[in-house]
Image (cartoon, grey):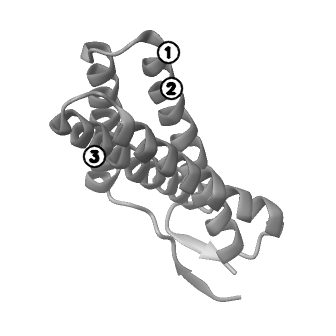
Amino acid sequence: MSKQLSPRPTAAFVGASWLALIVGGATFLIGLWNAQMQLNERGYYFTLLLYGLFSAVSLQKSVRDRLEGIKVTGIYYGMCWFSLLMAVLLLTVGLFNATIAPSEKGFFAMSFLLSLFAAVAVQKNVRDIAQADDVGGSFVKD
Protein backbone atom coordinates (compact mmCIF):
# COMPACT_ATOMS: atom_id res chain seq x y z
CA MET A 1 0.00 0.00 0.00
CA SER A 2 1.68 3.22 -1.14
CA LYS A 3 1.01 6.64 0.28
CA GLN A 4 1.21 9.97 -1.43
CA LEU A 5 0.78 13.49 -0.17
CA SER A 6 -2.77 14.79 -0.23
CA PRO A 7 -3.32 17.79 -2.46
CA ARG A 8 -4.43 19.91 0.50
CA PRO A 9 -4.59 23.55 -0.62
CA THR A 10 -2.92 26.30 1.37
CA ALA A 11 -5.00 28.71 3.41
CA ALA A 12 -3.91 31.53 1.11
CA PHE A 13 -5.24 29.73 -1.98
CA VAL A 14 -8.49 28.83 -0.23
CA GLY A 15 -8.95 32.44 0.85
CA ALA A 16 -8.07 33.82 -2.56
CA SER A 17 -10.54 31.42 -4.22
CA TRP A 18 -13.39 32.41 -1.92
CA LEU A 19 -12.52 36.09 -2.30
CA ALA A 20 -12.54 35.78 -6.10
CA LEU A 21 -15.93 34.04 -6.00
CA ILE A 22 -17.42 36.66 -3.69
CA VAL A 23 -15.96 39.58 -5.65
CA GLY A 24 -16.97 38.13 -9.03
CA GLY A 25 -20.50 37.27 -7.96
CA ALA A 26 -21.03 40.47 -5.99
CA THR A 27 -19.79 42.74 -8.77
CA PHE A 28 -21.99 40.93 -11.30
CA LEU A 29 -25.02 41.31 -9.02
CA ILE A 30 -24.24 44.94 -8.17
CA GLY A 31 -23.87 45.63 -11.88
CA LEU A 32 -27.28 44.07 -12.50
CA TRP A 33 -28.81 46.11 -9.70
CA ASN A 34 -27.43 49.36 -11.14
CA ALA A 35 -27.91 48.54 -14.83
CA GLN A 36 -30.44 50.48 -16.85
CA MET A 37 -32.28 47.44 -18.17
CA GLN A 38 -35.71 45.91 -17.76
CA LEU A 39 -36.44 43.43 -15.01
CA ASN A 40 -36.74 40.54 -17.46
CA GLU A 41 -33.23 41.30 -18.78
CA ARG A 42 -31.88 41.35 -15.24
CA GLY A 43 -33.57 38.01 -14.60
CA TYR A 44 -31.97 36.58 -17.74
CA TYR A 45 -28.46 37.57 -16.65
CA PHE A 46 -29.06 36.46 -13.05
CA THR A 47 -30.27 33.06 -14.26
CA LEU A 48 -27.23 32.77 -16.52
CA LEU A 49 -24.95 33.45 -13.56
CA LEU A 50 -26.59 30.71 -11.51
CA TYR A 51 -26.63 28.30 -14.46
CA GLY A 52 -22.99 29.03 -15.25
CA LEU A 53 -21.86 28.56 -11.66
CA PHE A 54 -23.72 25.26 -11.35
CA SER A 55 -22.44 23.92 -14.67
CA ALA A 56 -18.84 24.93 -13.90
CA VAL A 57 -18.90 23.19 -10.52
CA SER A 58 -20.62 20.13 -11.99
CA LEU A 59 -18.03 19.90 -14.77
CA GLN A 60 -15.15 20.25 -12.29
CA LYS A 61 -16.60 17.47 -10.17
CA SER A 62 -17.09 15.22 -13.19
CA VAL A 63 -13.53 15.78 -14.42
CA ARG A 64 -12.17 15.11 -10.95
CA ASP A 65 -14.29 12.00 -10.52
CA ARG A 66 -12.99 10.59 -13.79
CA LEU A 67 -9.39 11.31 -12.79
CA GLU A 68 -9.94 9.47 -9.51
CA GLY A 69 -11.49 6.46 -11.22
CA ILE A 70 -15.05 7.21 -10.11
CA LYS A 71 -17.48 6.31 -12.88
CA VAL A 72 -19.12 9.24 -14.66
CA THR A 73 -21.39 8.44 -17.56
CA GLY A 74 -20.43 9.87 -20.91
CA ILE A 75 -23.79 11.55 -21.34
CA TYR A 76 -23.52 13.38 -18.01
CA TYR A 77 -19.94 14.40 -18.75
CA GLY A 78 -21.01 15.69 -22.17
CA MET A 79 -23.96 17.54 -20.67
CA CYS A 80 -21.64 19.27 -18.21
CA TRP A 81 -19.45 20.53 -21.05
CA PHE A 82 -22.50 21.50 -23.11
CA SER A 83 -24.06 23.38 -20.18
CA LEU A 84 -20.93 25.37 -19.44
CA LEU A 85 -20.43 26.27 -23.09
CA MET A 86 -24.12 27.22 -23.43
CA ALA A 87 -23.95 29.49 -20.38
CA VAL A 88 -20.97 31.32 -21.85
CA LEU A 89 -22.54 31.43 -25.33
CA LEU A 90 -25.86 32.73 -24.00
CA LEU A 91 -24.07 35.44 -22.03
CA THR A 92 -22.07 36.38 -25.13
CA VAL A 93 -25.17 36.61 -27.33
CA GLY A 94 -27.07 38.52 -24.65
CA LEU A 95 -24.29 41.05 -24.18
CA PHE A 96 -23.73 41.40 -27.92
CA ASN A 97 -27.39 42.36 -28.38
CA ALA A 98 -27.71 44.39 -25.18
CA THR A 99 -28.26 48.14 -25.39
CA ILE A 100 -25.68 48.98 -22.76
CA ALA A 101 -22.31 50.66 -23.04
CA PRO A 102 -19.39 48.53 -24.25
CA SER A 103 -17.67 49.09 -20.90
CA GLU A 104 -20.68 47.57 -19.12
CA LYS A 105 -20.60 44.60 -21.48
CA GLY A 106 -16.95 44.02 -20.60
CA PHE A 107 -17.74 44.45 -16.92
CA PHE A 108 -20.44 41.77 -17.03
CA ALA A 109 -18.32 39.39 -19.12
CA MET A 110 -15.28 39.65 -16.85
CA SER A 111 -17.20 39.36 -13.58
CA PHE A 112 -19.07 36.34 -15.00
CA LEU A 113 -15.87 34.57 -16.06
CA LEU A 114 -14.17 35.42 -12.74
CA SER A 115 -17.12 33.87 -10.92
CA LEU A 116 -16.97 30.68 -13.01
CA PHE A 117 -13.24 30.27 -12.47
CA ALA A 118 -13.54 30.97 -8.75
CA ALA A 119 -16.42 28.50 -8.36
CA VAL A 120 -14.23 25.78 -9.86
CA ALA A 121 -11.35 26.68 -7.55
CA VAL A 122 -13.61 26.73 -4.48
CA GLN A 123 -15.09 23.33 -5.41
CA LYS A 124 -11.59 21.91 -5.85
CA ASN A 125 -10.51 23.29 -2.49
CA VAL A 126 -13.58 21.96 -0.70
CA ARG A 127 -12.99 18.51 -2.15
CA ASP A 128 -9.25 18.52 -1.45
CA ILE A 129 -9.77 19.60 2.16
CA ALA A 130 -12.49 16.98 2.72
CA GLN A 131 -10.26 14.29 1.22
CA ALA A 132 -7.30 15.33 3.37
CA ASP A 133 -9.47 15.43 6.51
CA ASP A 134 -10.90 11.97 5.80
CA VAL A 135 -7.46 10.38 5.93
CA GLY A 136 -5.97 12.23 8.83
CA GLY A 137 -4.83 15.35 7.07
CA SER A 138 -1.56 14.39 5.42
CA PHE A 139 -1.68 11.20 3.41
CA VAL A 140 -4.00 9.51 0.96
CA LYS A 141 -4.15 5.71 0.78
CA ASP A 142 -4.13 4.02 -2.63
Q: Is residue 53 above or below residue 60?
A: above
Quarter of image, res 33 = top left
Label number found at residue 53: none
Mark nearer the N terminus (3 vs 1)? 1
Q: Nearer the viewer, residue 95 or 72?
A: 95
Q: Nearer the viewer, residue 89 or 17?
A: 89
Mark 3 lies on a secondary structure that is: helix
Mark nearer the N terminus (2 vs 3)? 2
Q: Is residue 11 above or below residue 135?
A: above
Q: In this figure, which residue is indicated by the disc labeled 3?
A: 110
Residue at left offset 38%, top offset 37%: 97
Left or right: 16 with respect to 127?
left
Left or right: 116 with respect to 64?
left
Residue at left offset 35%, top offset 31%: 98
Label number found at residue 44: 2
Residue at left offset 54%, top offset 61%: 132
Q: Is residue 140 above or below residue 76?
A: below
Q: Quadrant of the N terminus?
A: bottom right
Quarter of image, res 23 = top left
Q: Between marks 2 and 3, how big is the CA–CA gap?
A: 17 Å
Q: Nearer the viewer, residue 137 or 57?
A: 57
Q: Nearer the viewer, residue 84 or 100?
A: 100
**What's the amino acid at mark 1?**
Asn
* Marks 1 & 2, CB-CB < 8 Å contact: yes
Q: In this figure, which residue is indicated by the disc labeled 1?
A: 40
Seen as rendered, the residue at the extreme bottom is 2
**What's the amino acid at mark 2?**
Tyr
